[in-house]
Amino acid sequence: MAHPVLLAEKTASGSSEDSGSQQGEIFERPKGWRGIYYHPTTQICMLGFVCFMCPGMFNALTGLGGGGKASTTANDNATAALYSTFAFFGFFSGTANNILGERLTLTLGTWGYSLYISSYLATNIHPGAGDFVVVAGAILGICASLLWTAQGALMMAYPTEAQKGLYIGIFWAIFNLGGVVGSAVAFGNNFHSTVLGNGTYIGFLILTLIGVFIPFFMANPAHMIRTDGTKVPRVQHPSWKHEFVSLWYALRTDPWILLLFPMFFASNYFYTWQFSDYNAAIFDIRARGLNNFVYWTSQIFGSMFIGYFVLDQAKYRRRTRAFAGWVTVTGMVFVIHIWAYFYQRTYTRATAPAIMMDINDKAYPAHVWLMIFYGFLDSMWQTYAYWLMGAMSNDPAKLAVFTGFYKSLQSAGAAGVWRADAVLIPYMNIFLSTWCLSAAGMLFALPMVYLRVKDRTELQDETM
């Protein structure tokens, strides 16, 4: 390691430029294979494959509508239980991440996905085991809160300021490739079936088990050096009391995060209508599998588009990019929901079972394009939300708290709407609430973008 050189200009100015990371010292990066292994891009890719194997398989299963079952009730209740526990424990997962470290937090978070997949396999073998799915969903909510908090802290801490949109896009592409692969497997294995076979669930289970072990091979964040030579700050491990106080202190010192709460709340809300009230409601299992495949495929392109071509164009000021991202996502919200409204008005819970559209039906091509564009919207929404949080700070401890708020609130919204679907609230009611919440989330975020996003991250924004 070379002798560190003080970043005199950054220290004097009290801010970090958009092309840099944050105040500190410059270190020489390792060479050879160590340079590849300890490169932030390598670690972000490994992080992506953790989520490829675990949340990716969960997404492939959920995207089929009802977990691939003919009835969506058990899946709705399990998903409501999942997001309920996620919503509660998400507020404390940032604390757990700071104390346990990212790798251990990731490992603890992954195994819940294996349990959840196995519960669906159990119900395929023993149809009366529906309660197991609900219990597994509740346990997965705790595990998922840990995994996603560790993921968010690493994904926003490893890149420099100018790389954040790109790295979020890389992660999102790999993560959603899991949904693509899982959907392709489900589509191929069940081309002539009415429900998913045991082989599909077993394949998903094996992949999630692989994901459990990947964090053991990831680098210790304390040994990581960014591409600009600055070290990733070491997260301090103060007392539990201080950690709980930090949740409140993060709000008190950075209250602008409150304006993102409606956006956070809506960020998983739209899945219920997309997967259960559209995909599962009017398509047969073969069409549902193909819809699921194109949905997650489009997510890859959506995240890379907004991450690289909108949010990381260094020739434009960061504030300009922030507004460009807002206009892009908000425009998609209104265009896609207007489109979807004309489909939703044609069916209800009573009439949907009579439709069961197949891939050979004349109306299918127009309907599958809506799934493609919903995939674009989802990936753009999530990428933009992470980018906004990353623009507020570079400190991993503060980002872990922000990510905890994000995942907790989005889970609270999802828990409510999945339960609403389980008790058979009309499709149109769920659709309209989805549209209104999505629009409100972007409108509330606009003042925060205008007042809080700066062209450079100020020193006082770095830590709590």
Image: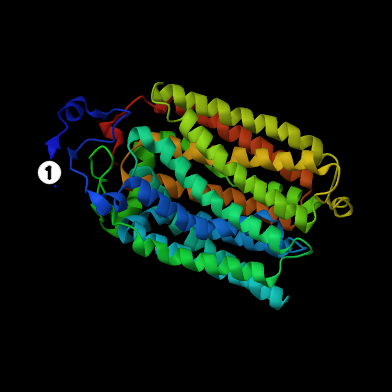
Does residue 135 appear in the picture of this structure? no
Which percent across, then down, holds residue 154?
37, 49
Does residue 251 appear in the picture of this structure? yes
Pick out the residue farthest to the front. Answer: 32
Which percent across, then down, holds residue 273?
71, 47
> How are the colours assigned in the image?
rainbow
**Is the residue 72 above or below the residue 303 in the image?**
below
Left or right of residue 85, residue 402 in this image: left
Q: Nearer the viewer, residue 183 or 394?
A: 183
Residue shown at 69% from the left, 43% from the top = 371
Mark 1, secondary structure of its residue: loop
Quarter of the figure with the C terminus: top left
Left or right of residue 228, residue 74 in this image: right
Mark 1 residue crowding within 10 angstroms, few (<14) / some (14–19) / many (20+) = few
Left or right of residue 7, residue 338 in this image: right
Residue shown at 31% from the left, 34% from the top = 461
Which percent across, then down, holds residue 162?
36, 32
**Is the residue 369 above or below the residue 408 in the image?**
above
Q: Nearer the viewer, residue 372 or 87?
A: 372
**Can you identify the residue that label 1 sits on?**
2
Which percent across, then down, holds residue 262?
55, 38
Residue shown at 68% from the left, 72% from the top = 198
Residue shown at 68% from the left, 56% from the top = 419
Q: Nearer the viewer, residue 409 or 172?
A: 172
Number of numbered discs: 1
The kind of residue tagged 1 is: Ala
Pick out the residue farthest to the left. Answer: 3
